[in-house]
Image (cartoon, grey):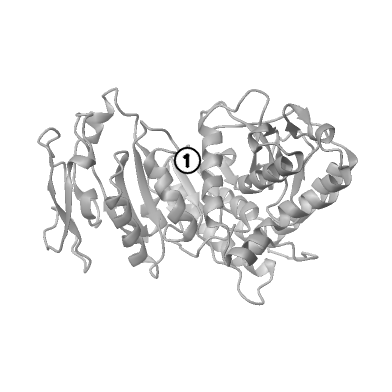
Amino acid sequence: MAAAAELVSPTVRAKQVFSPSPSFSRSSARWTSLQRSVRLPGVAKSSTRISCSVNQAPAPVAVQTEEPKGKNECYGVFCLTYDLRAEEETESWKKLISVAVSGAAGMISNHLLFKLASGEVFGPDQPVALKLLGSERSFQALEGVAMELEDSLFPLLREVQIGIDPYEVFQDVDWALLIGAKPRGPGMERADLLDLNGKIFADQGKALNAVASRNVKVIVVGNPCNTNALICLKNAPNIPAKNFHALTRLDENRAKCQLALKAGVFYDKVSNVTIWGNHSTTQVPDFLNARINGLPVKEVIKDHKWLEDEFTEIVQKRGGVLIKKWGRSSAASTAVSIVDAIRSLVTPTPEGDWFSSGVYTDGNPYGIAEGIVFSMPCRSKGDGDYELVKDVIFDDYLLKRITKSEAELLKEKRCVAHLIGEGIGVCDLPEDTMLPGEM
């Protein structure tokens, strides 16, 4: 689940506000790329001058709003300003959702952003603003991403902002998808990566704490994602710790795939699959509580040795096998799993089922150590929140594996103590449990 090193400031902000007419469609507009020096009032001039000419049907008339604040420069079609609030008052659209994505010029984001803009994630009647965070090195690539979004004519995409300052990009966001992180370099130990990426997520946590919505939902993808999520939430004390997630949904999806293959069924027959613990080789794909066609997996798959040995190893090493065959890490399936993770929070969980997410352990009913981010089974009412599932069973095999992953996360926490306000970081990780995609 490697993420490109696309990080964080100043922004090219695209603010648009649309007229009350619900009949507006970008397919009725003809977009032409021009070079010009015209700027909106109050907008600073920069070396990048991108704009457009628009011929559109007379129905929704563009209305100039108040001057943009700050030094943000409008970008292409997204410089247009309409009265978005007026349209929000109609029955045609829901209130605008603002989504920040870090590492926005990376491969994972290249798949994810178009799903977000199309309505595939939040629904076909949900307007979305995208705020894309990158680095100075990736800024031109961010402009290219914005151009592709512009050319895709998504009716639901109402605003695009690109920048390298998290304090600007995270302003008032409802969702923060933190994908950007440094990859593991040659000779780098897991402890080194924890410290390097931990500093990034500490800074991003502080920015979210300062400027994001007080109920922002945060999904951390950049590895090591569990401890990065812990660092992020510890640096954002004004945001509920429960709102932070580490992505383990791809691991769950891989586990469902393998169980379906072994049982000879389609994967929609597989439910109640949990990934326990860390996103590392200590992760625990739970077949004890999983079901196939409503029956316990162990009643359907009689080869219990396969379940205990090969199944777990296949799931843990799936990313490495993919890299060998494909020559790169799993960007597309990671993007799909991010979509799945968001949907699991914004749509009610099917009766009797659950999903996996790395969440804060305080108050958990399983006896897992508090104060870490640990993947556990969750249910949601579709309001963005979740509750931990209580009706799960354990056996000695499952408990032993969970304890090992718990111990690893506690050691990772000690490594980053200096980043979470708990003293001096001391690393004593006994072995390298990093997944191939982190390298």
Quarter holding the C terminus is: bottom right
Q: How many marks?
A: 1
The answer to whether 180 is drawn above or below residue 305 in the figure is: below
Residue 114 rendering spot, x and y as whole percentages = 40, 48
Residue most extreme to the bottom: 187
Q: Secondary structure at mark 1?
A: loop
* Rendering quarter of residue 1: bottom right
In this rendering, position of residue 19 left or right of residue 416: left
Compared with 383, 359 (above or below) is below
Picture coordinates of residue 169 (x, y %)?
Answer: 37, 52
Q: Is residue 206 left or right of residue 170?
A: right
Q: Is residue 433 above or below residue 40?
A: below
Residue 203 coordinates in the image, percent (x, y): 50, 58
Left or right of 28: which side holds 144? right
Give the residue type that dot 1 points to: Val
Q: Nearer the viewer, residue 168 or 85?
A: 85
Query: Against 69, is 184 above or below?
Result: below
Taking the spot 34% from the left edge, 29% from the top edge, the residue there is 94
Identify the image quadrant of residue 361.
top right
- Residue 338 horizontal/vertical position (percent): 53, 46
Query: Which residue is at 47% across, 40% downward?
Result: 216
Q: What residue does disc 1 label? A: 216
Q: Is residue 286 visible?
A: yes
